[in-house]
Amino acid sequence: MVETLNISKQDIAVMSMEEVEDLAIRLEQDNYTNAFDGLNDWHLLRAIAFQRPELVEAYVYLLDLDPYDES
């Protein structure tokens, strides 16, 4: 598993589509031994979405980044 607390922009820059898919599968299965592991994966996916959105397009629904109406 990727250490999300120590991940750098350079690490994200070299991530493959397969690594992102594995991350998304872990999040979908939500079978973590503790809540912090799941939260760390979520933060990693979010960081990838900001730096390399093309890798996360198929998994945006896991991030709940839908804009909402403030009116």
Image (spheres, rainbow, N blue to C red):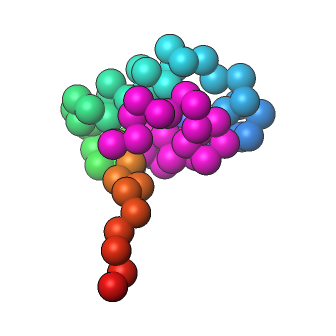
x and y, in percent, of residue 28 in the image: 26, 32
Residue 51 sits inside the magenta stretch: yes
Residue 26 sits inside the magenta stretch: no
x and y, in percent, of residue 58 in the image: 41, 29
Quadrant that contains the C terminus: bottom left
Q: Quadrant of residue 13?
A: top right
Q: Residue at x 34, y 42 (%)?
A: 62
Left or right position of 46 against 26: right
First to last magenta residue range: 38-61
Q: Residue at x 23, y 29 (%)?
A: 29
Q: Quadrant of residue 24?
A: top left
The chief SS type of the magenta part is: helix
Q: Residue furthest top?
A: 18
Q: Quadrant of residue 4?
A: top right
Q: Is residue 1 visible?
A: no
Comparing 2 with 67, the one in front is 67
